[in-house]
Image (tube, rainbow, N blue to C red):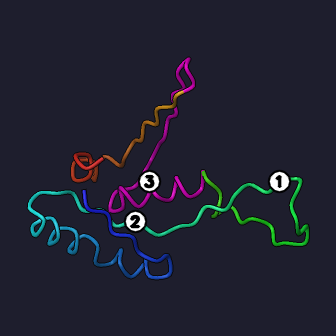
Amino acid sequence: AVIIYVPIPQQKVFQKIQIILVRELEKKFSGKHVVVIGERKILPKPTRKARNPLKQKRPRSRTLTAVYDAILEDLVFPAEIVGKRIRVKLDGSQLVKVHLDKNQQTTIEHKV
């Protein structure tokens, strides 16, 4: 797979042309999947031993789970996620089942 990282401020512009761009790049790279993902940053969880207690609060968009959810949204972009199920096994590993919108499911399902 070919992954293209796009800065977050320009992501909306890329999403307007993403369907055409991905189709042309998949032709050029002979059958490889092409994915456009926003370049996000994960900030560490604040600790009690923080050196500077007057720092700004960590925004929700920079947390680990918010970034992972946003990357998942970017992976299936033309389609919408309508449901998500997290299955936790006894050994602690997790399996995330993502349900896509029915009318867009067939175009995206082979990539995910």
Q: Looking at the image, do the residues carrying marks 1 and 2 touch, with CB atoms under 8 Å apart?
A: no
Residue linked to disc 2: 37
Q: Is residue 64 left or right of residue 99?
A: right
Q: Earlier in the sequence, mark 3 or mark 1?
A: 1
Q: Amino acid at mark 2?
A: Ile
Query: Which of the labelled discs sits on residue 47, or is there none?
Result: 1
Residue found at x 22% / y 46%: 110
Residue 111 drawn at (x, y percent): 25, 50
Q: Amino acid at mark 3?
A: Leu
- The relative height of residue 87 versus residue 14 in the rendered view (above or below) is above
Query: Which of the labelled discs sits on residue 72, or is there none?
Result: 3
- Disc 2 residue crowd, few under 14, some 14–19, many 20+, Cα 10 Å: many
Residue 26 drawn at (x, y percent): 15, 64
* Region of the chain picked out in magenta, as a range: 65-92
- Tag 3 secondary structure: helix
Q: In this view, which residue lies farthest toward the top?
A: 90
Q: Earlier in the sequence, mark 3 or mark 2?
A: 2
**Which residue occupies the foreground of this view, 97 or 99?**
97
